Amino acid sequence: MERNAGIRKVLISTLFLNLLVSGAKIAYGYLTNSVGIMSDGFHSVFDGISNVIGLIGVNIASQPPDRQHPYGHRKYETVFTIFVGVFMVLTCIEIFKNVFASFSGRQEAVVTAESFAIMLATLGINVFVAVYESRMGKKLSSEFLVADSKHTLSDIYVTIGVIISLVFISLGVPEADPVAGIIVGLVIARTGVMVIRDSAEKLVDRSCADISSIERIVSGVDGVGGCHSIRTRGTGNYVFVDIHVVVDPELSVEESHLIADGVEAAIKKGLSEVVDVVVHIEPGEKIPCGPKTGNPVNFPFTKSS
């Protein structure tokens, strides 16, 4: 698909830039014993890993459902994302080792003009990546690209903090370097935990759509007397919906089926992220969509001849 090809192009381009940024920071951080720069480099590595996850997700998403995977292959992306979160948490161990070495005096950061040049150059690249991914994400209707651009935006704030720490080091406050490393390490750990938590929630089928919007859409379908027991699962842009719809008990099977088709079409039209809707038809008194409350009333339509 043209959309998938466009997303792949963006991810490959930003992957190259993210690897360039992270490589420069990590290499220079080790050369100058700067915990802050090195830690920021590790933080940037995860932008590249995120790009790889995105590429895997696009390829998996392009595969149609099969007998073994009737709901598609989207959750493979979620599984890979959990591994990324675990890797992020483990990386913090290396960062905190360097922080301890810096505080104990075994290594001391060296700040040069090149330190500022590298950090400012990589900051500029990160700004470009964030703006580019956000713009293309909106153009291609890709939630992943939009979300990844926000992740890159957090890198920008971290990099600015590291640059500030370099200023303090050059002014004779060497403790600013390990402090910057601690802050970056905590940011990575927090992000990793959030990634694991959110991915685990998707694997256990956390509700992932606005139920009130579904109720509003369904209540406007002709022939629907009410709805309840709405369930959703999936990922942000690949949602499955189960819903119970109440219809006139005197309608024929064919007429009830047409109403079910109308409900499915309305939900898919109103919520672009929905890919499949299972409608359970129930005969009964008219109820509002949502919880069964209030006094029942008669249906406004009658059985056709």
Image (cartoon, rainbow, N blue to C red):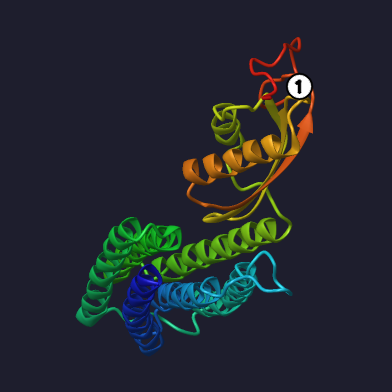
Q: Which of the image's four quarters has the N terminus? A: bottom left
Q: In this view, does 145 lie above or below 224?
A: below
- Location of residue 132 in the rendering, given as x and y in whole percent from the top left corner: 27, 65
Give left or right: position of 16 versus 121. right
Q: How crowded is mark 1: few (under 14 residues within 10 Å), some or many (20 or more)?
A: few
Residue at the image point whose x is 27% and y is 66% from the top: 167
Residue at the image point whose x is 78% and y is 26% from the top: 249
The residue that disc 1 covers is 292
Q: Is residue 214 above or below residue 90?
A: above
Q: Is residue 301 above or below residue 240?
A: above
Q: Which of the image's four quarters has the C terminus? A: top right
Residue at the image point whose x is 62% and y is 62% from the top: 193
Name the residue furthest front: 305
Q: Nearer the viewer, residue 173 or 6?
A: 6
Examine the image and state in which quarter residue 243 appears: top right
Q: Which element carries disc 1, helix, strand or loop?
A: loop
Q: Disc 1 marks which amino acid?
A: Lys
- Location of residue 124 in the rendering, given as x and y in whole percent from the top left corner: 23, 69
Examine the image and state in which quarter residue 35 appears: bottom left
Q: Nearer the viewer, residue 143 or 249?
A: 249
Residue at the image point whose x is 52% and y is 66% from the top: 188
